[in-house]
Amino acid sequence: MIKKMKLKGHIIDSLILSKLLDQINELGLTCYATEVSIGKRREDISEATFVIEADNNDEMEKAIELAKKQGAY
């Protein structure tokens, strides 16, 4: 199973993106960013698209729940 999700905000300077990818990888799943747009100024918003790969629905649901808690959609 493959799920593509997005995350917006101050995801780089707050380490949200890297922490989320690490948390999902710690579940034993594959998770990686496919697109990242970093704001040029401190007040600019960054955006990332990432992919989660899981073998079954239960694993995927756990990963999606973690991602949504960090604001992913």
Image (spheres, rainbow, N blue to C red):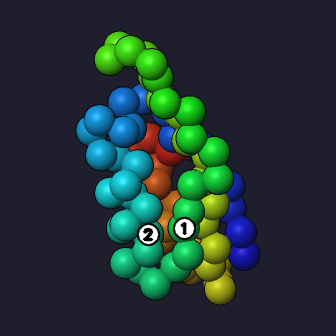
In the image, what residue occupies the spot 36% across and 30% down?
10
Q: Mark on residue 70? A: none
* Number of residues whose C-alpha sits closer than 10 Å to that of mark 2, classed few (under 14), some (14–19) or many (20 or more): many
> In this view of the protein, can residue 69 be seen by the observer?
no
Q: For the residue marked with disc 1, what is the amino acid?
A: Cys
Q: Residue furthest right?
A: 1
Q: CA distance from mark 2 to mark 1?
A: 6 Å
Helix, strand or loop under label 2: helix
In the image, what residue occupies the spot 36% across and 67% down?
23
Residue 8 lies, with reference to residue 41, above or below; the image says below
- Across and down, in percent, residue 59 comes to 54, 79
Q: Which residue is mark 2?
A: 24
Q: Quadrant of residue 55?
A: bottom right
Q: Which residue is mark 1?
A: 31
**Pointer 2 and pointer 1: residues touching (CB < 8 Å)?**
yes
Residue 40 lies, with reference to residue 52, above or below; the image says above
- Across and down, in percent, residue 22 comes to 37, 67
- Quarter of the rendering occupied by the C terminus: top right
Residue 31 lies, with reference to residue 43, above or below; the image says below
Q: For the residue marked with disc 2, what is the amino acid?
A: Ile
- Quarter of the rendering occupied by the N terminus: bottom right
